[in-house]
Image: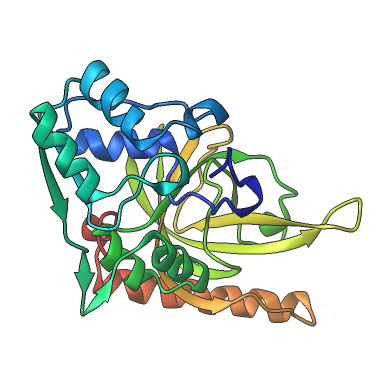
Amino acid sequence: MSVVAPDRVPKQILTLAQKEEILREMDVDALLVVPFSHEFSRWTAERFIQEFLVDALQVSEVRIGHDFCFGAGREGNLAMLTAAGARAGFVVQGLDDVRIRGIRVSSSIVRDAIMKGTMRTVALALGRTYFIDGRVATGRRLGRKIGFPTVNVDPANDLFPGNGVFVTTSRFESFNRCFESVTNIGVRPTLYENYATTIESHILDFDSNVYGDTVRVYFHELLRREQQFRSALELTNQIRMDIERSRRYFLRRPIRDADRTS
């Protein structure tokens, strides 16, 4: 869609590197990433089947969703592929929808749940705790000035939860373990009077220099939405309450479980 309709491209839930990692953990032997160009988008379904599936890949079995379409104009479907497979000698299997509690799981539903901050719904749909990756960047260090130092995350992901405060765990590459954390996603004005989204995590009981490190932030629960404060005292009091609520969360769900499941 980034080629044929760039103005309608949805934000990706995972980066390519994250997809590769998850597939590797599932013992997938090989992953083929095919660049999608304007020329490729004009291939007919029959050309795709013959030149790509049969001639190039020499497939023996293909599995697709029942509503999957391919080829220019979305002319290719399960029925066409099944007929082509019978002629060319490969098996085609249509896969049923994945449903949880009667609701069809789709990337659109997952994106919507991420933006709403309903992290348990996201975890249920994905089968894992939702996370983003990023690099720890230098910030304005305002949190340290009020007694709550934070790490500023420059995200690799295009998609992340809507503005609010979340119970999270943070895994730093240099430590290779998870730490309990509280993460704020919010906006701040830029020099040009626009607003930039910032992701800041306060790591509980942590005082190490991790600037430049790679971090993975797992989102477990939305504590509250972003709000304005009339004074620094009001802000610090709220932060203390957020931290206390996070500690209570981890008492119920120890970190050894929290980094993978909610």
Tell me where residue 184 sits by quadrant. bottom right
Tell me what residue is drawn at x 11 percent, y 31 percent: 87
Tell me what residue is drawn at x 77 percent, y 61 percent: 188
Q: Is residue 205 above or below residue 113?
A: above
Residue 71 position, x and y percent, is 40, 39
Residue 85 position, x and y percent, is 14, 35
Q: Is 83 left, or right, of 145 in this rendering?
A: left
Q: Is 244 left, or right, of 105 in this rendering?
A: right
Tell me what residue is drawn at x 20 percent, y 37 percent: 25
Tell me what residue is drawn at x 24 percent, y 26 percent: 53
Task: For the C terminus, give its image quadrant.
Answer: bottom left
Residue 3 position, x and y percent, is 58, 38
Q: Is residue 37 above or below residue 219?
A: above
Q: From the viewer's side, name the closer residue of 106 and 131.
A: 106
Q: Is 140 left, or right, of 12 in this rendering?
A: right
As drawn, which residue projects farthest toward the top? 56
Residue 200 position, x and y percent, is 59, 55
In this rendering, the count of numbered labels is 0
Q: Is residue 8 above or below residue 244?
A: above
Q: Is residue 13 above or below residue 125?
A: above
